[in-house]
Amino acid sequence: MGAPLIEMEHVSFRYEQTKALEDITLTVRKGDFLAILGPNGSGKSTLLKILLGLIKPTTGTVRLFGKDIRHFRERERIGYVSQKANSFNSGFPATVEEVVKGGLAKKTGLFRRFPESAEEDVTRALKAVGMETSRKRLVGELSGGQQQRVFIARALVSRPEVLILDEPTVGVDKQNVQSFYDMLDRLNKEQEITLILVTHDAEMVSDRISHVACLNRTMHFHGFKNEMERMSAEQLEAWYGHSVRKVHHAGAVR
Amino acid sequence: MIEAILTYDFLQNAFAAGLIIGVIAPLLGVFIVVRRLSLIADALSHVTLAGIAGSLFLSQSVAALAALNPLYLGIAASVAGSVMIERLRRLYKHYEELAIPIILSAGIGFGAIFISLAQGFQTDLFGYLFGSVSAVSRQDLWIVTAIAGVVVLFILLFYKELFVLSFDEEFAKASGLPSRWIHFLFMIVTALVIAGSMRIVGILLVSSLMTLPVAAAMRISGSFKGTILWSVLFGEFSVLAGLVMAFYFNLAPGGTIVVTSIVVLLLVIAFSKSVRTKTNEVVT
Ligand SMILES: Nc1ncnc2c1ncn2[C@@H]1O[C@H](COP(=O)(O)OP(=O)(O)O)[C@@H](O)[C@H]1O
Ligand SMILES: [Mg+2]
Protein backbone atom coordinates (compact mmCIF):
# COMPACT_ATOMS: atom_id res chain seq x y z
CA MET A 1 0.00 0.00 0.00
CA GLY A 2 1.25 3.46 -0.86
CA ALA A 3 1.85 6.19 1.65
CA PRO A 4 -1.20 8.27 2.58
CA LEU A 5 -1.08 11.53 0.60
CA ILE A 6 -4.46 12.90 1.61
CA GLU A 7 -6.14 12.29 4.93
CA MET A 8 -9.46 13.85 5.93
CA GLU A 9 -10.79 13.16 9.39
CA HIS A 10 -14.33 13.99 10.53
CA VAL A 11 -14.53 16.95 8.20
CA SER A 12 -17.73 19.00 8.09
CA PHE A 13 -18.44 22.09 6.08
CA ARG A 14 -21.36 24.47 5.90
CA TYR A 15 -22.07 27.39 3.62
CA GLU A 16 -24.14 30.14 5.23
CA GLN A 17 -27.36 28.10 5.22
CA THR A 18 -26.46 24.75 3.67
CA LYS A 19 -24.73 21.89 5.41
CA ALA A 20 -22.66 20.64 2.48
CA LEU A 21 -20.50 17.98 4.16
CA GLU A 22 -20.85 16.11 7.41
CA ASP A 23 -18.30 13.95 9.19
CA ILE A 24 -16.27 12.97 6.14
CA THR A 25 -13.31 10.67 6.68
CA LEU A 26 -11.26 9.82 3.61
CA THR A 27 -7.76 8.55 2.89
CA VAL A 28 -6.07 8.62 -0.50
CA ARG A 29 -2.79 6.76 -0.93
CA LYS A 30 -0.03 7.08 -3.45
CA GLY A 31 -1.02 5.50 -6.77
CA ASP A 32 -4.75 5.39 -6.02
CA PHE A 33 -7.28 6.24 -8.70
CA LEU A 34 -10.28 7.41 -6.71
CA ALA A 35 -13.65 8.24 -8.23
CA ILE A 36 -15.95 10.43 -6.16
CA LEU A 37 -19.55 9.69 -7.09
CA GLY A 38 -22.77 11.31 -6.00
CA PRO A 39 -25.84 13.17 -7.24
CA ASN A 40 -25.80 16.89 -7.99
CA GLY A 41 -25.41 19.03 -4.91
CA SER A 42 -23.98 16.16 -2.85
CA GLY A 43 -20.88 18.12 -1.86
CA LYS A 44 -18.34 16.69 -4.33
CA SER A 45 -16.96 20.04 -5.46
CA THR A 46 -17.01 21.30 -1.88
CA LEU A 47 -14.86 18.35 -0.83
CA LEU A 48 -12.34 19.08 -3.58
CA LYS A 49 -12.24 22.76 -2.65
CA ILE A 50 -11.36 21.82 0.90
CA LEU A 51 -8.50 19.61 -0.32
CA LEU A 52 -7.23 22.48 -2.47
CA GLY A 53 -7.33 24.92 0.43
CA LEU A 54 -9.86 27.14 -1.37
CA ILE A 55 -12.20 26.86 1.63
CA LYS A 56 -11.52 25.86 5.23
CA PRO A 57 -13.45 23.02 6.90
CA THR A 58 -15.85 24.12 9.63
CA THR A 59 -14.65 21.22 11.79
CA GLY A 60 -12.28 18.29 11.34
CA THR A 61 -8.70 17.98 10.14
CA VAL A 62 -7.08 17.64 6.72
CA ARG A 63 -3.53 16.44 6.18
CA LEU A 64 -1.74 16.67 2.84
CA PHE A 65 1.49 14.71 2.43
CA GLY A 66 1.44 14.16 6.17
CA LYS A 67 1.23 17.85 6.96
CA ASP A 68 -1.70 19.77 8.41
CA ILE A 69 -3.31 21.69 5.55
CA ARG A 70 -2.99 24.96 7.48
CA HIS A 71 0.78 24.66 7.27
CA PHE A 72 0.96 23.09 3.80
CA ARG A 73 2.74 25.36 1.32
CA GLU A 74 3.83 23.02 -1.51
CA ARG A 75 0.71 23.52 -3.60
CA GLU A 76 2.56 22.58 -6.78
CA ARG A 77 2.48 18.94 -5.59
CA ILE A 78 -1.29 18.95 -6.23
CA GLY A 79 -2.65 19.69 -9.69
CA TYR A 80 -6.22 20.84 -10.22
CA VAL A 81 -8.59 20.78 -13.17
CA SER A 82 -11.82 22.58 -12.40
CA GLN A 83 -15.25 22.22 -13.89
CA LYS A 84 -14.32 24.14 -17.02
CA ALA A 85 -17.50 26.12 -17.57
CA ASN A 86 -17.17 27.88 -14.23
CA SER A 87 -13.84 29.52 -14.47
CA PHE A 88 -12.74 29.97 -18.06
CA ASN A 89 -13.53 32.84 -20.39
CA SER A 90 -13.43 31.29 -23.86
CA GLY A 91 -12.70 34.58 -25.62
CA PHE A 92 -9.45 34.92 -23.73
CA PRO A 93 -6.64 35.77 -26.20
CA ALA A 94 -4.00 33.30 -25.05
CA THR A 95 -2.20 30.42 -26.74
CA VAL A 96 -2.14 26.86 -25.45
CA GLU A 97 1.51 27.36 -24.60
CA GLU A 98 0.84 30.51 -22.55
CA VAL A 99 -1.95 28.82 -20.62
CA VAL A 100 0.07 25.70 -19.83
CA LYS A 101 3.09 27.74 -18.78
CA GLY A 102 0.82 29.48 -16.27
CA GLY A 103 0.80 26.20 -14.37
CA LEU A 104 4.45 26.86 -13.49
CA ALA A 105 3.78 30.26 -11.92
CA LYS A 106 3.68 29.06 -8.32
CA LYS A 107 6.69 26.77 -8.66
CA THR A 108 8.75 29.52 -10.31
CA GLY A 109 8.07 31.89 -7.42
CA LEU A 110 7.19 35.56 -7.07
CA PHE A 111 9.30 38.22 -8.80
CA ARG A 112 10.95 35.64 -11.07
CA ARG A 113 10.68 34.96 -14.75
CA PHE A 114 9.94 31.49 -16.04
CA PRO A 115 13.18 29.47 -16.20
CA GLU A 116 14.63 28.17 -19.50
CA SER A 117 13.43 24.68 -18.61
CA ALA A 118 9.81 25.89 -18.74
CA GLU A 119 9.72 25.30 -22.51
CA GLU A 120 10.62 21.61 -22.10
CA ASP A 121 8.17 21.23 -19.23
CA VAL A 122 5.40 22.61 -21.44
CA THR A 123 6.37 20.25 -24.27
CA ARG A 124 6.38 17.26 -21.94
CA ALA A 125 2.97 18.17 -20.46
CA LEU A 126 1.43 18.76 -23.91
CA LYS A 127 2.79 15.43 -25.13
CA ALA A 128 1.30 13.66 -22.12
CA VAL A 129 -2.17 14.86 -23.15
CA GLY A 130 -1.56 14.54 -26.89
CA MET A 131 -1.80 18.24 -27.66
CA GLU A 132 1.76 19.12 -28.69
CA THR A 133 0.71 20.10 -32.22
CA SER A 134 -1.69 22.77 -30.91
CA ARG A 135 0.95 24.63 -28.95
CA LYS A 136 0.56 27.96 -30.77
CA ARG A 137 -3.20 27.89 -31.20
CA LEU A 138 -5.59 30.11 -29.24
CA VAL A 139 -7.36 28.15 -26.50
CA GLY A 140 -10.68 29.70 -27.47
CA GLU A 141 -10.47 28.03 -30.89
CA LEU A 142 -10.20 24.50 -29.50
CA SER A 143 -13.05 22.06 -28.93
CA GLY A 144 -14.30 21.39 -25.41
CA GLY A 145 -12.36 18.14 -25.17
CA GLN A 146 -9.16 19.72 -26.44
CA GLN A 147 -9.51 22.58 -23.97
CA GLN A 148 -9.92 20.12 -21.16
CA ARG A 149 -6.68 18.40 -22.23
CA VAL A 150 -4.93 21.75 -22.18
CA PHE A 151 -6.13 22.34 -18.63
CA ILE A 152 -4.81 18.94 -17.64
CA ALA A 153 -1.48 19.83 -19.21
CA ARG A 154 -1.49 23.05 -17.20
CA ALA A 155 -2.04 20.99 -14.05
CA LEU A 156 0.65 18.46 -15.04
CA VAL A 157 3.35 20.91 -16.02
CA SER A 158 4.53 21.43 -12.45
CA ARG A 159 4.89 17.62 -12.07
CA PRO A 160 2.26 17.18 -9.37
CA GLU A 161 2.01 13.92 -7.45
CA VAL A 162 -1.76 14.20 -7.12
CA LEU A 163 -4.17 15.34 -9.81
CA ILE A 164 -7.67 16.46 -8.81
CA LEU A 165 -10.32 16.67 -11.55
CA ASP A 166 -13.85 18.02 -11.11
CA GLU A 167 -16.24 16.61 -13.74
CA PRO A 168 -13.66 17.04 -16.50
CA THR A 169 -15.76 15.45 -19.23
CA VAL A 170 -18.76 17.78 -19.01
CA GLY A 171 -19.06 19.31 -22.48
CA VAL A 172 -16.78 16.70 -24.08
CA ASP A 173 -18.48 14.62 -26.77
CA LYS A 174 -19.03 10.91 -26.21
CA GLN A 175 -16.37 9.37 -28.44
CA ASN A 176 -13.71 11.66 -26.98
CA VAL A 177 -14.62 10.82 -23.42
CA GLN A 178 -13.25 7.31 -23.87
CA SER A 179 -9.85 8.48 -25.10
CA PHE A 180 -9.86 11.10 -22.38
CA TYR A 181 -10.09 8.36 -19.76
CA ASP A 182 -7.43 6.34 -21.58
CA MET A 183 -5.17 9.28 -21.10
CA LEU A 184 -5.96 9.53 -17.38
CA ASP A 185 -5.30 5.82 -17.11
CA ARG A 186 -1.82 6.26 -18.60
CA LEU A 187 -1.04 9.11 -16.22
CA ASN A 188 -2.02 6.91 -13.32
CA LYS A 189 -0.27 3.71 -14.43
CA GLU A 190 2.80 5.02 -16.27
CA GLN A 191 3.59 8.21 -14.42
CA GLU A 192 2.21 6.99 -11.10
CA ILE A 193 0.17 10.10 -10.58
CA THR A 194 -2.49 9.72 -7.91
CA LEU A 195 -5.88 10.68 -9.32
CA ILE A 196 -9.01 11.99 -7.66
CA LEU A 197 -11.86 12.25 -10.11
CA VAL A 198 -15.36 13.61 -9.64
CA THR A 199 -17.54 12.22 -12.39
CA HIS A 200 -20.94 11.09 -13.55
CA ASP A 201 -19.46 8.63 -16.07
CA ALA A 202 -19.35 5.88 -13.45
CA GLU A 203 -19.76 3.14 -16.02
CA MET A 204 -16.98 4.35 -18.25
CA VAL A 205 -14.38 4.71 -15.53
CA SER A 206 -15.25 1.60 -13.55
CA ASP A 207 -12.52 -0.50 -15.24
CA ARG A 208 -9.83 2.04 -14.58
CA ILE A 209 -10.37 3.24 -11.04
CA SER A 210 -9.06 1.54 -7.90
CA HIS A 211 -11.24 3.21 -5.27
CA VAL A 212 -14.72 4.69 -4.98
CA ALA A 213 -16.19 7.25 -2.62
CA CYS A 214 -19.98 7.54 -2.59
CA LEU A 215 -20.89 10.96 -1.30
CA ASN A 216 -24.15 12.61 -0.46
CA ARG A 217 -23.40 15.13 2.27
CA THR A 218 -22.17 12.20 4.35
CA MET A 219 -19.90 9.42 3.10
CA HIS A 220 -22.04 6.42 2.16
CA PHE A 221 -19.20 4.22 1.04
CA HIS A 222 -15.46 4.57 0.73
CA GLY A 223 -13.07 1.81 -0.25
CA PHE A 224 -11.87 -0.49 -3.05
CA LYS A 225 -14.25 -0.47 -5.96
CA ASN A 226 -14.98 -4.22 -5.80
CA GLU A 227 -16.05 -3.87 -2.18
CA MET A 228 -18.77 -1.53 -3.37
CA GLU A 229 -20.77 -4.52 -4.56
CA ARG A 230 -21.47 -5.26 -0.94
CA MET A 231 -23.61 -2.16 -0.63
CA SER A 232 -27.21 -3.27 -0.18
CA ALA A 233 -30.06 -1.93 -2.28
CA GLU A 234 -31.20 0.09 0.73
CA GLN A 235 -27.75 1.58 1.18
CA LEU A 236 -27.56 2.46 -2.49
CA GLU A 237 -30.94 4.08 -2.37
CA ALA A 238 -30.09 6.02 0.78
CA TRP A 239 -27.05 7.32 -1.07
CA TYR A 240 -28.42 8.10 -4.49
CA GLY A 241 -32.19 8.32 -4.06
CA HIS A 242 -34.75 6.33 -6.05
CA SER A 243 -33.30 6.29 -9.52
CA VAL A 244 -30.39 4.07 -8.57
CA ARG A 245 -29.93 0.70 -10.28
CA LYS A 246 -27.48 -1.83 -8.95
CA VAL A 247 -25.59 -3.46 -11.78
CA HIS A 248 -23.31 -6.47 -11.47
CA HIS A 249 -20.37 -4.23 -12.20
CA ALA A 250 -19.03 -2.26 -9.28
CA GLY A 251 -19.25 1.46 -9.72
CA ALA A 252 -21.72 1.16 -12.55
CA VAL A 253 -24.38 3.36 -11.08
CA ARG A 254 -26.63 5.67 -12.95
CA MET B 1 4.96 69.88 -35.96
CA ILE B 2 8.43 68.93 -34.71
CA GLU B 3 9.33 72.60 -34.83
CA ALA B 4 6.28 73.56 -32.79
CA ILE B 5 7.13 70.91 -30.23
CA LEU B 6 10.67 72.23 -29.95
CA THR B 7 9.40 75.79 -29.58
CA TYR B 8 6.61 75.41 -27.04
CA ASP B 9 7.17 73.96 -23.58
CA PHE B 10 3.52 73.08 -23.17
CA LEU B 11 3.58 70.99 -26.33
CA GLN B 12 6.65 69.14 -25.09
CA ASN B 13 4.82 68.34 -21.88
CA ALA B 14 1.68 67.22 -23.67
CA PHE B 15 3.49 65.02 -26.18
CA ALA B 16 5.82 63.46 -23.63
CA ALA B 17 2.89 62.73 -21.29
CA GLY B 18 0.90 61.45 -24.29
CA LEU B 19 3.71 59.09 -25.32
CA ILE B 20 3.80 57.65 -21.81
CA ILE B 21 0.03 57.34 -21.43
CA GLY B 22 -0.22 55.74 -24.86
CA VAL B 23 1.85 52.88 -23.43
CA ILE B 24 0.57 52.43 -19.89
CA ALA B 25 -3.18 52.86 -20.42
CA PRO B 26 -3.51 50.08 -23.03
CA LEU B 27 -0.89 47.95 -21.23
CA LEU B 28 -3.00 47.83 -18.09
CA GLY B 29 -6.13 47.93 -20.21
CA VAL B 30 -5.41 44.44 -21.58
CA PHE B 31 -5.75 42.99 -18.10
CA ILE B 32 -8.79 45.15 -17.37
CA VAL B 33 -10.58 43.99 -20.51
CA VAL B 34 -9.86 40.26 -20.15
CA ARG B 35 -10.88 40.38 -16.52
CA ARG B 36 -14.10 42.18 -17.53
CA LEU B 37 -13.42 45.16 -15.29
CA SER B 38 -13.90 47.92 -17.90
CA LEU B 39 -16.75 49.50 -15.97
CA ILE B 40 -14.59 49.79 -12.89
CA ALA B 41 -12.24 51.99 -14.86
CA ASP B 42 -15.17 54.24 -15.66
CA ALA B 43 -16.27 54.46 -12.05
CA LEU B 44 -12.74 55.32 -10.91
CA SER B 45 -12.37 58.10 -13.44
CA HIS B 46 -15.46 59.79 -12.07
CA VAL B 47 -14.10 59.48 -8.55
CA THR B 48 -10.92 61.14 -9.82
CA LEU B 49 -13.04 64.06 -10.99
CA ALA B 50 -14.44 64.46 -7.47
CA GLY B 51 -10.89 64.55 -6.08
CA ILE B 52 -9.77 67.15 -8.58
CA ALA B 53 -12.80 69.37 -8.05
CA GLY B 54 -12.34 69.02 -4.29
CA SER B 55 -8.71 70.02 -4.59
CA LEU B 56 -9.56 73.10 -6.64
CA PHE B 57 -12.15 74.08 -4.07
CA LEU B 58 -9.60 73.66 -1.26
CA SER B 59 -7.05 75.74 -3.17
CA GLN B 60 -9.56 78.56 -3.36
CA SER B 61 -10.71 78.45 0.21
CA VAL B 62 -7.45 77.65 2.05
CA ALA B 63 -4.64 80.08 1.23
CA ALA B 64 -1.88 77.63 2.20
CA LEU B 65 -3.11 75.16 -0.42
CA ALA B 66 -3.45 77.69 -3.24
CA ALA B 67 -0.63 76.13 -5.27
CA LEU B 68 -1.60 72.49 -4.71
CA ASN B 69 -1.53 70.42 -7.91
CA PRO B 70 -5.08 69.00 -8.18
CA LEU B 71 -3.67 65.77 -9.59
CA TYR B 72 -2.56 64.68 -6.10
CA LEU B 73 -6.04 64.69 -4.63
CA GLY B 74 -7.33 63.21 -7.87
CA ILE B 75 -4.94 60.28 -7.43
CA ALA B 76 -5.85 59.95 -3.76
CA ALA B 77 -9.57 59.88 -4.56
CA SER B 78 -9.06 57.32 -7.33
CA VAL B 79 -7.04 55.00 -5.08
CA ALA B 80 -9.56 55.39 -2.25
CA GLY B 81 -12.32 54.64 -4.75
CA SER B 82 -10.60 51.43 -5.85
CA VAL B 83 -10.30 50.27 -2.24
CA MET B 84 -13.97 51.04 -1.64
CA ILE B 85 -15.05 49.16 -4.75
CA GLU B 86 -13.25 46.09 -3.42
CA ARG B 87 -14.94 46.49 -0.03
CA LEU B 88 -18.35 46.77 -1.66
CA ARG B 89 -17.73 43.85 -3.97
CA ARG B 90 -17.03 41.68 -0.96
CA LEU B 91 -20.05 43.04 0.91
CA TYR B 92 -22.41 42.34 -2.01
CA LYS B 93 -20.92 38.96 -2.94
CA HIS B 94 -23.80 38.00 -5.19
CA TYR B 95 -24.19 41.44 -6.76
CA GLU B 96 -20.57 42.38 -7.33
CA GLU B 97 -21.39 44.77 -10.16
CA LEU B 98 -23.48 46.85 -7.77
CA ALA B 99 -20.25 48.38 -6.44
CA ILE B 100 -19.74 50.16 -9.75
CA PRO B 101 -22.88 52.36 -9.90
CA ILE B 102 -22.49 53.10 -6.18
CA ILE B 103 -18.95 54.41 -6.57
CA LEU B 104 -19.68 56.06 -9.90
CA SER B 105 -22.60 58.05 -8.55
CA ALA B 106 -20.66 58.96 -5.42
CA GLY B 107 -17.91 60.32 -7.67
CA ILE B 108 -20.28 62.36 -9.82
CA GLY B 109 -22.26 63.56 -6.79
CA PHE B 110 -19.22 64.87 -4.91
CA GLY B 111 -17.75 66.16 -8.15
CA ALA B 112 -20.89 68.19 -8.92
CA ILE B 113 -20.94 69.70 -5.43
CA PHE B 114 -17.27 70.71 -5.50
CA ILE B 115 -17.58 72.04 -9.03
CA SER B 116 -20.40 74.33 -8.02
CA LEU B 117 -18.56 75.39 -4.86
CA ALA B 118 -15.29 76.20 -6.62
CA GLN B 119 -15.99 79.37 -8.50
CA GLY B 120 -14.30 79.79 -11.82
CA PHE B 121 -13.54 76.08 -12.11
CA GLN B 122 -16.06 75.90 -14.91
CA THR B 123 -13.44 77.26 -17.31
CA ASP B 124 -10.98 74.46 -16.46
CA LEU B 125 -13.73 71.90 -16.29
CA PHE B 126 -13.79 71.36 -20.03
CA GLY B 127 -10.09 70.47 -19.99
CA TYR B 128 -10.57 68.00 -17.14
CA LEU B 129 -13.52 66.33 -18.80
CA PHE B 130 -12.15 66.05 -22.33
CA GLY B 131 -8.41 66.54 -21.99
CA SER B 132 -6.19 69.42 -22.94
CA VAL B 133 -3.06 70.01 -25.03
CA SER B 134 -2.10 73.22 -23.29
CA ALA B 135 -2.78 72.48 -19.62
CA VAL B 136 -0.13 69.81 -18.98
CA SER B 137 2.49 71.32 -16.66
CA ARG B 138 6.03 70.13 -16.12
CA GLN B 139 4.96 68.88 -12.72
CA ASP B 140 2.09 66.91 -14.28
CA LEU B 141 4.61 65.33 -16.61
CA TRP B 142 6.76 64.22 -13.67
CA ILE B 143 3.76 62.73 -11.93
CA VAL B 144 2.78 60.82 -15.07
CA THR B 145 6.38 59.58 -15.43
CA ALA B 146 6.41 58.35 -11.84
CA ILE B 147 3.09 56.57 -12.36
CA ALA B 148 4.44 54.93 -15.51
CA GLY B 149 7.42 53.68 -13.50
CA VAL B 150 5.12 52.07 -10.97
CA VAL B 151 2.94 50.49 -13.67
CA VAL B 152 5.80 49.02 -15.68
CA LEU B 153 7.49 47.70 -12.54
CA PHE B 154 4.23 46.16 -11.39
CA ILE B 155 3.62 44.40 -14.70
CA LEU B 156 7.21 43.16 -14.95
CA LEU B 157 7.24 41.82 -11.40
CA PHE B 158 3.82 40.18 -11.48
CA TYR B 159 3.33 39.32 -15.15
CA LYS B 160 2.92 35.58 -14.73
CA GLU B 161 0.70 35.88 -11.66
CA LEU B 162 -1.44 38.53 -13.38
CA PHE B 163 -1.79 36.30 -16.41
CA VAL B 164 -2.89 33.26 -14.40
CA LEU B 165 -5.22 35.35 -12.26
CA SER B 166 -6.82 36.94 -15.33
CA PHE B 167 -7.23 33.67 -17.17
CA ASP B 168 -8.60 31.58 -14.33
CA GLU B 169 -9.00 33.02 -10.86
CA GLU B 170 -9.95 29.73 -9.25
CA PHE B 171 -6.86 28.00 -10.61
CA ALA B 172 -4.70 30.87 -9.36
CA LYS B 173 -6.10 30.44 -5.87
CA ALA B 174 -5.82 26.66 -5.99
CA SER B 175 -2.15 26.93 -7.03
CA GLY B 176 -1.52 28.98 -3.93
CA LEU B 177 -0.74 32.27 -5.70
CA PRO B 178 -1.37 35.33 -3.48
CA SER B 179 -4.25 36.33 -5.74
CA ARG B 180 -5.98 38.62 -3.27
CA TRP B 181 -2.89 40.72 -2.82
CA ILE B 182 -2.14 40.87 -6.47
CA HIS B 183 -5.71 41.88 -7.25
CA PHE B 184 -5.53 44.60 -4.60
CA LEU B 185 -2.29 45.99 -6.04
CA PHE B 186 -3.81 45.76 -9.51
CA MET B 187 -6.74 47.93 -8.47
CA ILE B 188 -4.42 50.54 -7.00
CA VAL B 189 -2.24 50.61 -10.10
CA THR B 190 -5.41 50.96 -12.21
CA ALA B 191 -6.45 53.94 -10.10
CA LEU B 192 -3.03 55.51 -10.67
CA VAL B 193 -3.17 55.05 -14.44
CA ILE B 194 -6.64 56.57 -14.62
CA ALA B 195 -5.63 59.63 -12.63
CA GLY B 196 -2.47 60.01 -14.71
CA SER B 197 -4.14 59.63 -18.10
CA MET B 198 -6.91 62.02 -17.21
CA ARG B 199 -4.85 65.16 -17.98
CA ILE B 200 -4.49 64.23 -21.64
CA VAL B 201 -7.64 62.31 -22.57
CA GLY B 202 -10.03 63.70 -19.98
CA ILE B 203 -12.05 61.99 -17.29
CA LEU B 204 -14.91 60.94 -19.52
CA LEU B 205 -12.63 59.22 -22.02
CA VAL B 206 -9.89 57.62 -19.91
CA SER B 207 -11.53 54.22 -19.92
CA SER B 208 -11.81 54.33 -23.74
CA LEU B 209 -8.05 54.56 -24.04
CA MET B 210 -7.79 51.48 -21.81
CA THR B 211 -10.32 49.44 -23.77
CA LEU B 212 -10.57 50.48 -27.45
CA PRO B 213 -6.97 49.61 -28.42
CA VAL B 214 -7.38 46.27 -26.64
CA ALA B 215 -10.64 45.56 -28.44
CA ALA B 216 -8.80 46.10 -31.74
CA ALA B 217 -5.76 44.07 -30.68
CA MET B 218 -7.87 41.07 -29.70
CA ARG B 219 -9.25 40.87 -33.24
CA ILE B 220 -5.89 40.20 -34.82
CA SER B 221 -3.51 38.89 -32.20
CA GLY B 222 -2.62 35.22 -31.94
CA SER B 223 -1.40 35.24 -28.35
CA PHE B 224 -1.63 37.11 -25.07
CA LYS B 225 1.75 38.77 -25.44
CA GLY B 226 0.77 39.73 -28.98
CA THR B 227 -2.42 41.30 -27.66
CA ILE B 228 -0.38 43.43 -25.28
CA LEU B 229 1.98 44.51 -28.06
CA TRP B 230 -0.77 45.42 -30.52
CA SER B 231 -2.75 47.24 -27.83
CA VAL B 232 0.21 49.43 -26.96
CA LEU B 233 0.87 50.06 -30.65
CA PHE B 234 -2.73 51.07 -31.38
CA GLY B 235 -2.92 53.13 -28.19
CA GLU B 236 0.29 54.97 -28.95
CA PHE B 237 -0.77 55.70 -32.52
CA SER B 238 -4.17 57.01 -31.39
CA VAL B 239 -2.68 59.28 -28.74
CA LEU B 240 -0.06 60.79 -31.05
CA ALA B 241 -2.37 61.22 -34.03
CA GLY B 242 -5.06 62.57 -31.74
CA LEU B 243 -2.72 65.10 -30.13
CA VAL B 244 -1.50 66.38 -33.51
CA MET B 245 -5.08 66.86 -34.70
CA ALA B 246 -6.10 68.48 -31.43
CA PHE B 247 -3.21 70.96 -31.75
CA TYR B 248 -3.79 71.88 -35.40
CA PHE B 249 -7.56 72.12 -35.31
CA ASN B 250 -7.79 73.40 -31.74
CA LEU B 251 -9.93 70.49 -30.57
CA ALA B 252 -10.18 68.65 -27.25
CA PRO B 253 -7.54 65.87 -27.43
CA GLY B 254 -9.80 63.41 -25.61
CA GLY B 255 -12.16 63.61 -28.55
CA THR B 256 -9.55 63.30 -31.29
CA ILE B 257 -7.74 60.46 -29.50
CA VAL B 258 -10.85 58.42 -28.90
CA VAL B 259 -12.21 59.01 -32.41
CA THR B 260 -8.84 57.89 -33.79
CA SER B 261 -9.00 54.71 -31.69
CA ILE B 262 -12.48 54.04 -32.98
CA VAL B 263 -11.33 54.47 -36.58
CA VAL B 264 -8.43 52.09 -35.84
CA LEU B 265 -10.86 49.61 -34.31
CA LEU B 266 -13.21 49.74 -37.31
CA LEU B 267 -10.33 49.31 -39.75
CA VAL B 268 -9.03 46.34 -37.80
CA ILE B 269 -12.47 44.74 -37.70
CA ALA B 270 -12.89 45.21 -41.46
CA PHE B 271 -9.37 43.89 -42.09
CA SER B 272 -9.70 40.84 -39.84
CA LYS B 273 -13.06 39.99 -41.42
CA SER B 274 -11.62 40.05 -44.92
CA VAL B 275 -8.65 37.95 -43.82
CA ARG B 276 -10.97 35.46 -42.16
CA THR B 277 -13.26 35.08 -45.16
CA LYS B 278 -10.21 34.66 -47.39
CA THR B 279 -8.69 31.93 -45.23
CA ASN B 280 -12.09 30.27 -45.05
CA GLU B 281 -12.29 30.27 -48.85
CA VAL B 282 -8.88 28.62 -49.02
CA VAL B 283 -9.95 25.98 -46.52
CA THR B 284 -13.26 25.13 -48.17
N1 LIG C 1 -20.74 29.07 -2.78
C1 LIG C 1 -21.80 28.45 -2.22
N2 LIG C 1 -22.61 29.11 -1.36
C2 LIG C 1 -23.66 28.51 -0.79
N3 LIG C 1 -24.00 27.21 -0.99
C3 LIG C 1 -23.24 26.49 -1.83
C4 LIG C 1 -22.09 27.07 -2.50
N4 LIG C 1 -21.52 26.11 -3.27
C5 LIG C 1 -22.27 25.01 -3.10
N5 LIG C 1 -23.28 25.21 -2.24
C6 LIG C 1 -24.27 24.21 -1.79
O1 LIG C 1 -23.58 23.15 -1.17
C7 LIG C 1 -24.09 21.89 -1.58
C8 LIG C 1 -22.98 21.07 -2.23
O2 LIG C 1 -22.57 21.68 -3.45
P1 LIG C 1 -21.41 21.12 -4.37
O3 LIG C 1 -20.25 20.78 -3.51
O4 LIG C 1 -21.18 22.08 -5.45
O5 LIG C 1 -22.08 19.79 -4.94
P2 LIG C 1 -21.67 18.88 -6.19
O6 LIG C 1 -20.33 19.33 -6.68
O7 LIG C 1 -21.67 17.49 -5.66
O8 LIG C 1 -22.73 19.07 -7.21
C9 LIG C 1 -25.24 22.20 -2.51
O9 LIG C 1 -26.43 22.13 -1.76
C10 LIG C 1 -25.00 23.59 -2.98
O10 LIG C 1 -26.20 24.25 -3.24
MG1 LIG D 1 -19.74 20.12 -8.60
Image (cartoon, rainbow, N blue to C red):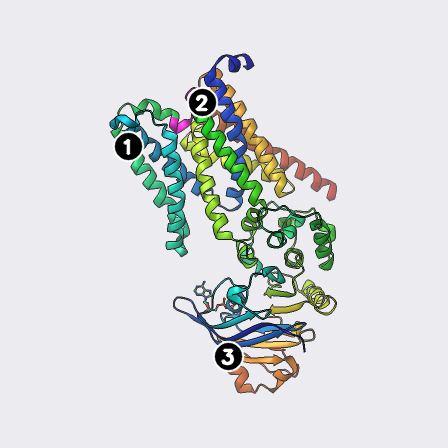
Q: What is the magenta range?
A: B128-135
Q: Nearer the viewer, residue A175 or B18?
A: B18
Find numbered disc 1 in the image and state the secondary structure of the residue it sits on: helix
Q: Which amino acid type is shown beneath numbered disc 2?
A: Arg
* Percent x, y of residue A62: 52, 71
| Residue A147 placement, left or right of B168 | right
Question: Residue tagged by mark 3?
Answer: A241
Q: CA distance from mark 3 to mark 1?
A: 64 Å
Using the image, name the chain to which the residue with label 3 belongs: A
Using the image, name the chain to which the residue with label 2 belongs: B
* Percent x, y of residue A104: 63, 53
Name the residue at 41% across, 27% down.
Answer: B130
- Can residue B266 be seen at all in this image of the molecule? no
A179 inside magenta stretch = no
State the image quarter where residue A160 is shown.
bottom right
- The label nearer to you, 2 versus 3, is 2
Q: CA distance from mark 2 to mark 1?
A: 26 Å
Q: Tell me, yes or no, whether the two marked residues, 2 and 3, touch with CB atoms within 8 Å.
A: no
State the image quarter where residue B232 is shown.
top right
Q: Which amino acid type is shown beneath numbered disc 3?
A: Gly
Q: Which amino acid type is shown beneath numbered disc 1?
A: Phe
Q: Which mark is residue B114?
A: 1
Question: Residue tagged by mark 2?
Answer: B138
Q: CA distance from mark 2 to mark 3?
A: 74 Å
Identify whether A248 is placed above or below B251: below
Q: Nearer the viewer, residue B113 or A59?
A: A59
- Can residue A32 be seen at all in this image of the molecule? yes
